[in-house]
Amino acid sequence: MEHTTPWWKNAVIYQIYPRSFQDSDGDGVGDLNGIVQRLDYLAGLGVDALWLCPVYRSPQDDNGYDISDYCDIDPLFGTLADMERLIREAARRGIRIIMDLVLNHSSDEHPWFLEAKKSRENPYHDYYIWRDGVPGTPPNDMKACFGGSAWTWVPELGQYYFHQFSVKQPDLNWDNPAVRRQIYEVINFWIEKGVGGFRLDVIDQIAKVPDEKITNNGPMLHAYIREMNRATFGGTDLVTVGETWGATPRIARQYSDPAGDEFSMVFQFEHIGLDQQPGGEKWDLAPLRLTELKRVFSKWQTELYGRGWNSLFWNNHDLPRIVSRWGDDGAYREVSAKMLATLLYGLQGTPYIYQGEELGMTNACYPLKDCRDIETLNLYKERREKEYTEEEVMRSIHAKGRDNARTPMQWTDGPNAGFTTGEPWIRVNPNHRQINARRQTGEPDSVFSYYKRLIALRKNTPVVQNGRYELLCPQDPDVFAYKRDDGKNTLYVVCNFYGRPAEGPLLPVREGQVLISNYPEPPAGRRLCPYEAVWYLCRNDRADPAPSGQ
Ligand code: GLC
């Protein structure tokens, strides 16, 4: 590999939801010292960096995505000194820390907003987005992501402020150069602390134009990002990944152009929307069609090849658990979790593991009284008022609610899964008795061991990093198969996506070329068992015999 390849192109990044990872002080909420306790586990898995969801000072209206001090740690999670220790301890194990930057909005308890709402003349007033009006008639009909109007009335000022998320998350006004300067100072503060990079929350929404109802991809977006890049992380080796729900491959190339000056890569969500009704919301459920998933992955693999960089993920703190969603969390839990990893990890890009994914953790399906997420609670209210039945609403929440991903990490089969000695802020999934890290780490056939092998294999198999992608059997409704070819080697990835036997494509592979597979024995010819998945590696200069499996 040429020496100019950035480290993150060959890295695997592990996402931590600090609240639910490991509690060290018995208050029922995970914390930074808890993460330090688990660094050896993470190093053992083989990951290169940890992306931490926000740990800054926050009233926790949206679990930390509502920040009231960007340069301090919330006491729930620890102190700035704990953060410095985490960065050091992680570095000792070759692991970098990636901070989550929430720059589209702050908390309404941030000193900037407290000042801003004092008077129209206050110097901080223009840090946010205000419109004159009369009570009861917002400037327009824009909706907030967490329900209700995107405009909230402040009687003292006789003005509305704009918020794309909850009422406690007022949008920052990026058109104000003073706001942008302050934000760059925050970023540089963390760079000086030695972090390894940033994930930029809903970054494509910063250049909104509410009067024209533009939320993402506003006209000034890329100008602001390039300015931020120049003022902060540009020219460093930090990894930067933007969360961009509105990205197309063309836009993603602009963000992640290897010769460009924006980000390393973005999270795009086209595959994530494939199991919802067209034109509906994520709660409007529809079955996934495998041919659609193939089309979407293939498009991104092809259109970014050599001109951008993909992030690869099934899960995050906003999404349901993949094994419950597109695998089988019953009889085939382990084998389907491994299949999903086999499929994703053969693609080009940087993979992200969300905590517990490496154990095959499942959705939680709690009754409403055990749900904690502001989005879920608001959705329930809103849809029940609109006369959806209790059953319909709960079905959507169980399938898509964010709490599915936020239940505590399952370390052991003991009390509270070893997450806390206190009362956990959200219930532990009762299946921790069977699904837990202690049981899996020493077990060679576990989901954990399989992820560990896949991570190591990715690093030692250059074709995974560079090979050109080609989809095989695009119309096959059951099997997702593709190849990657870098001139020297070809990697074939073959996955039966469902819990019934299937037939894979005809391939020029033979015994001895299997790199990894999720059954004790690799496939016999083209026949695939339920959820069977395999990687074959072939040297291109070897004249292979007639295709096997006949
Ligand atoms: C992003 C975060 C999500 C948060 C929202 C508002 O989508 O991933 O958790 O609620 O932004 O900050």
Image: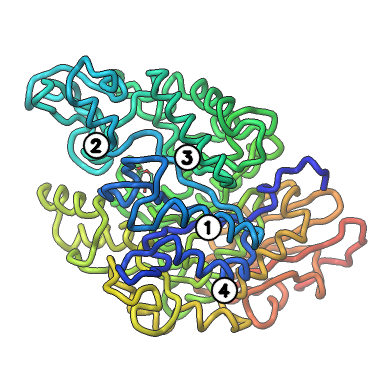
Residue highlighted by disc 1: 85
Spatial distance from mark 1 to mark 3, Cα to Cα? 23 Å
Dot 4 amino acid type: Phe
Q: Ligand 1 is found in which quarter of the picture?
A: top left
Spatial distance from mark 1 to mark 2, Cα to Cα? 30 Å
Dot 2 amino acid type: Asp
Q: Earlier in the sequence, mark 1 or mark 3?
A: 1
Q: Secondary structure at mark 4?
A: helix
Residue 510: name its quadrant: bottom right
Residue highlighted by disc 4: 448
Dot 3 amino acid type: Leu
Residue highlighted by disc 2: 108
Task: Identify the residue at image location x=55%, y=54%.
Answer: 87
Residue highlighted by disc 3: 200
Front tag of 2 and 4:
2
Spatial distance from mark 2 to mark 3, Cα to Cα? 20 Å
